[in-house]
């Protein structure tokens, strides 16, 4: 049973939040404290926060379509009609694409984003790789028996508690097989060395989330990063109580680092914007949603 929490103002750790905090304190301010800025700037900040990129939308659209596919599997075990699925995927991808403002267009890096070539082709490739994978075949043969207990892109932000601190670790897909709980995290980025290190930490977060909510021992939780591009590949990890203890200690330190930039941590009220310095690595600015506010590029 997934626990529910009453809303509190105190900030919650997440991998993406702390990554932004590390990358640039000013970007962190704009991303999480725009409501604290000058009123006339808030509309601009909301526009900039919502800018997306081609790479992000490939991942976002793929996630949404796989979510629909899995929910369809919960309703029927009939084989997937590839032609109908492909037609649906294209309609869904186009629907999402048409609602987005792309960073590449906003900052005049490109004149247009080609839906077919830039977005749909890689999305379809990733989906096709999954449809042809042994994992999908295994889901039909081993996991459907408990399909009513599947958790697919759960509502909310995946709140839990790590070291008694609020944290968010939202899983993509969770399902039981026997006494084990499997977690799949879809990835559309390449499984290179840097990504694998980052994704390993994310998987530890999912293991912690499952252990917290479902009262499972860590050896019963099987987390896997499922890379959809350029071909289907999985990377799984095994964790034990010592790994999770170390992870919890790190989350506590990282949360306390972010608390240092709050004038009131219980109400999550930030320090003045001037106390959030710009990064010294200007290469980061070239890909930042908020670059126009900092006169860096």
Image (cartoon, grey):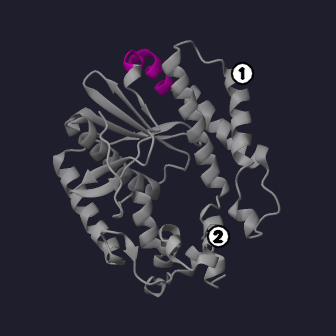
Q: Is residue 9 magenta?
A: no
Magenta segment boundaries in residue numbering: 134-146
**What element does badge 2 sit on?**
helix
> Looking at the image, is mark 2 or mark 1 earlier in the sequence?
2
Between 131 and 156, the residue placed more toward the observer is 156
In the rendered image, is residue 121 in sight? no
Does residue 296 sit above or below 230 in this rendering?
Answer: below
Count of labels in the image: 2
| Residue 212, quarter of picture | top left
Mark 1 is surrounded, within 10 Å at the Cα level, by few (under 14), some (14 to 19) or many (20 or more) other residues, namely few
Q: Quadrant of the N terminus?
A: top left
Q: Quadrant of the C terminus?
A: bottom right
Residue 287 at x, y = what percent? Answer: 62, 69
Where does label 2 land, which residue? 43
Residue 220's label in the rendered image is: none
CA–CA distance between discs 2 and 1?
A: 42 Å
Where does label 1 land, which residue? 83
Residue 196 at x, y = what percent? Answer: 42, 52
Residue pictured at 26% horizontal, 52% vertical? 161
């Amino acid at each position: 049973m997934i626990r529910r929490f009453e809303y509190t103002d105190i900030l919650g750790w997440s991998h993406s939040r702390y990554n932004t905090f590390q990358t640039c304190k000013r970007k962190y301010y704009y991303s999480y404290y725009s409501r604290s800025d000058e009123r006339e700037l808030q509309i601009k900040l909301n526009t900039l926060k919502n800018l997306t990129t081609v790479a992000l939308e490939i991942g976002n659209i793929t996630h949404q379509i796989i979510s629909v596919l899995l929910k369809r599997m919960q309703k029927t075990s009939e084989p997937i009609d590839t032609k109908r699925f492909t037609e649906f995927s294209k309609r869904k991808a186009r629907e999402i694409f048409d609602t987005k403002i792309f960073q590449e267009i906003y900052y005049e890096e490109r004149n247009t984003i080609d839906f077919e070539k830039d977005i749909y082709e890689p999305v379809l490739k990733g989906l096709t790789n999954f449809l042809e994978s042994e994992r999908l075949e295994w889901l039909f043969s081993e996991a459907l028996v408990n399909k009513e207990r599947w958790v697919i892109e759960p509502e909310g932000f995946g709140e839990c508690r790590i070291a008694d601190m609020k944290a968010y670790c939202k899983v993509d897909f969770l399902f039981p097989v026997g006494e084990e709980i499997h977690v799949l995290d879809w990835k559309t980025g390449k499984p290179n060395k840097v990504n694998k290190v980052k994704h390993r930490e994310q998987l530890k977060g999912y293991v912690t989330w499952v252990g917290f909510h479902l009262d499972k021992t860590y050896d019963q939780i099987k987390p896997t990063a499922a890379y959809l591009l350029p071909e289907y590949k999985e990377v799984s990890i095994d964790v034990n109580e010592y790994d999770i203890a170390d992870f919890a200690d790190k989350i506590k330190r990282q949360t306390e680092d972010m608390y240092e930039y709050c004038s009131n941590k219980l109400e999550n009220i930030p320090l003045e914007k001037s106390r959030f310095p710009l990064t010294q690595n200007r290469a980061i600015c070239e890909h930042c949603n908020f670059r126009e506010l900092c006169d860096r590029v």
